[in-house]
Amino acid sequence: MIHFALRCEAAAHDFDGWFRSGEDFEGQVSRGLVTCPVCGSTEIAKALMRPAVSGTRDERSPAEASRMMAALRAMSREVRANADYVGPAFAEEARKIHYGEADERRIYGEASPVEVKGLMEEGIAALPLPPLPEDKN
Ligand SMILES: [Zn+2]
């Protein structure tokens, strides 16, 4: 099913329609089967506004990529602001918290890929944080 934002040509009423395909939509409109729910007009067209389509990685615009990076950095900052920094002891501390040997709290620190893999195998969620620009000094 495809969702179209529709508009009646007569009075510019906006409404939504669901169709099997673009051809199905055209066919129903040409046979007068699509009517405006407000005024009953059969002069229906797709509204100019179109829903966003997520492209493939290759088509992703630089602006979108930088927005995503900004969102990741914001998440990274949020974690750093609200979690305890435990440095290279991250894996050890995460285990202590997981097994109730330390107070339950949010932590972040450094861990090797092997350590992170080990934590995940024990069912301990460890998320990699993207580096921040201020880290590179
Ligand atoms: Zn209408």
Image (cartoon, rainbow, N blue to C red):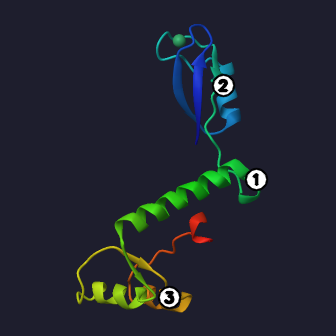
Circle 1 or circle 2, nearest the eye: 1
Kindly identify the residue that appears in the image at 23 percent across and 81 percent down: 103
Q: Quadrant of residue 92?
A: bottom left
Mark 3: give few (<14), some (14-19) or many (20+) Cα within 10 Å.
Answer: some
Q: CA distance from mark 1 to mark 2?
A: 22 Å
Of labels 1 and 2, earlier in sequence is 2
Query: In x, y percent, where is residue 129?
Result: 51, 71
Name the residue carrying label 2: 48
Q: CA distance from mark 2 to mark 3?
A: 48 Å
Name the residue carrying label 3: 117
Kindly identify the residue that appears in the image at 33 percent across and 73 percent down: 106
Instruction: Say which mark, if any, is on residue 111.
Output: none
Element at label 2: loop
Residue kind at label 2, given as amino acid type? Leu
Of labels 2 and 3, earlier in sequence is 2
In front: 97, or 31? 97
In this view, 16 is above or below 66: above
Mark 1: give few (<14), some (14-19) or many (20+) Cα within 10 Å.
Answer: few
- Looking at the rendered image, the quarter that the C terminus falls into is bottom right
Q: Is residue 125 left or right of residue 28?
A: left
Query: In x, y percent, where is residue 102?
Result: 24, 86
Residue kind at label 3, given as amino acid type? Lys
Query: In x, y percent, where is residue 94?
Result: 36, 85
In this view, 9 is above or below 136: above
Query: In x, y percent, where is residue 8?
Result: 59, 15
Mark 3 CB lies closer than 8 A to ligand 1: no
Element at label 1: helix
> Does the image show residue 52?
yes
Residue kind at label 1, given as amino acid type? Glu
Marks 1 & 2, CB-CB < 8 Å contact: no
Instruction: Say which mark, if any, is on residue 59.
Output: 1
Mark 1 CB lies closer than 8 A to ligand 1: no
